[in-house]
Image (cartoon, helix red, strand yellow):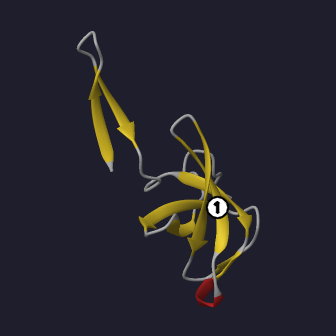
Amino acid sequence: MTWVVVTARGCAVVADLSPLGHIGVLLVGTRGSDGPGEVLVRIRGGSETYLAYSDEPLPKGSTVLVIECGKSRTVHVAPWSDPFTTQAT
């Protein structure tokens, strides 16, 4: 969800309230279809945690991309590596 707020000076400010598309780090590894882990996502000028589900098990400390948002602070994540910092070998 995205909100557009107009300030007293008439400036439009976009406030993104959704973790969708944000990068996070797993605090607790996911177990694929066996259960969720926990992901820390930097959002809205701070950090928030969400229950994180994934298609395959992912270990603690993995960098992930939030690809779907569910209800009650749940997200679906996928492994992520930054294409601008990953070096080809």
Determine the secondary structure under disc 1: strand
Check the image and report above or below for 33 versus 67: below
Q: Residue at 50% of width from left, 67% of height from top?
A: 75
Q: Residue at 44% of width from left, 54% of height from top?
A: 21
Q: Where in the figure is residue 20, as x and y percent of width and height?
A: 43, 56
Look at label 1 and name its amino acid: Val
Of residues 44 and 84, which is closer to you in this image? 44
Quarter of the image with the C terminus in it: bottom right
Number of numbered discs present? 1
Q: Residue at 56% of width from left, 52% of height from top?
A: 23
Check the image and report above or below for 84 versus 69: above
Q: Residue at 67% of width from left, 66% of height from top?
A: 38
Of residues 26 and 74, which is closer to you in this image? 74
Q: Where in the figure is residue 61, as x and y percent of width and height?
A: 75, 61
Quarter of the image for residue 6 reads top left
| Crowd band around label 1 with a 10 angstrom C-alpha radius: few (<14), some (14–19), many (20+) | many
Residue positioned most to the left: 10
For label 1, the residue is 39
